[in-house]
Amino acid sequence: RVWILFLLILTNRKNSGLYEDHLTILNDVNQTPILWKNKGDNATIHCNHTKGINYFQMYWYRQVPGENIKLIVFTTTAKPDHDFGDFDKKKFSATKPDAESGTFTVENLEPGDQGLYFCAVSQHSDTDTCGTYFGSGTKLTVLDPKREITPPTVKVFQPSSKECRNLKDEKERKKTLLCVARDFYPDHVSIFWQVNAKNVTKGVATDPAARLDDKTYFITSRLRVHAEVWTSPGTNFSCFVTFFDGNKTIIKDETVFAVEGMFMWNSEIT
């Protein structure tokens, strides 16, 4: 997600007025990671940084589904009035109490306000040599009062017996396991894989975002391994899905064994 954000910002550099050639995304900028609010509520995101008092300029960006990232407001301790550009001050507000902190508020939430909100800081410069540092983003969800908060169900599908069977080079033969998490609401989930109880990232491809199916969400992830790994007796493959229900994180998982492909267990951890 970080690299996608970086590229999106570069494509919008002419509209933002920032020196995007010098953007950096580090942990020195911290912001509220997740916000769940009901329709009609206000949502306030907090941001602070450890870059020092010289970084007294703060920017707030929004990226809603299907749109590029956009700069909403520029704030600074140097002047009390914040620059909202073309955005409505009745919809958005911001505070800048000191050089190292600030807040951003979305008023009277509507479903269309859902998305990712980013805080960025920079120091004043008359040249293009200063860096702009981004936080990791705030995921804002506007809850539908008619929908219940529901954790996902998880299913792992075995590789197809027909996959890559015609390849002559055995070393190139690979098998793909599919993990499907569905029937959850809202869409605050993440997925990771384990092989023999060890985390793996190589060969993993997960949907960039959950998709809405009627009233609930679903998401898929694939794990591609060498055919010899899949046919190694006793090897097990587990898909874990983490879900935040507003109070705690729930982990749902399913495990299958190589060769036999037998479903072994399904568990829930809170």
Image: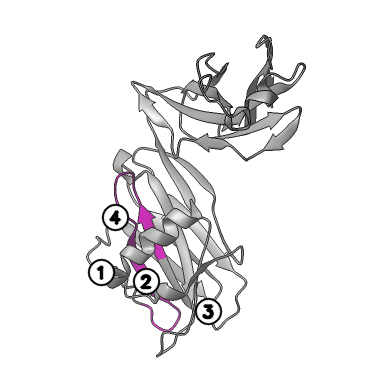
**Label 4 vs label 1: CA separation?**
13 Å
In the rendered image, the residue lying farthest to the bottom is 126
Q: Type of residue at label 3?
A: Tyr
The first of marks 3 and 4 along the sequence is 3
Residue 17: x percent and y percent? Answer: 32, 75
Which contiguous range is marked in magenta?
Answer: 60-80
Q: Type of residue at label 2?
A: Phe
Tag 3 secondary structure: loop
Viewer-side label of 2, 4 = 2
**Label 3 vs label 2: CA separation?**
13 Å
Viewer-side label of 4, 1 = 1
| Residue 266 seen in this snapshot | no
Disc ID at residue 85: 1
Q: Residues within 10 Å of mark 1 (few under 14, many from 20)?
A: few
| Residue at mark 4 | 91
| Residue 105 seen in this snapshot | yes
**Label 3 vs label 4: CA separation?**
26 Å
| Residue at mark 2 | 74
**Label 2 vs label 4: CA separation?**
15 Å
* Snapshot quadrant of residue 19: bottom left
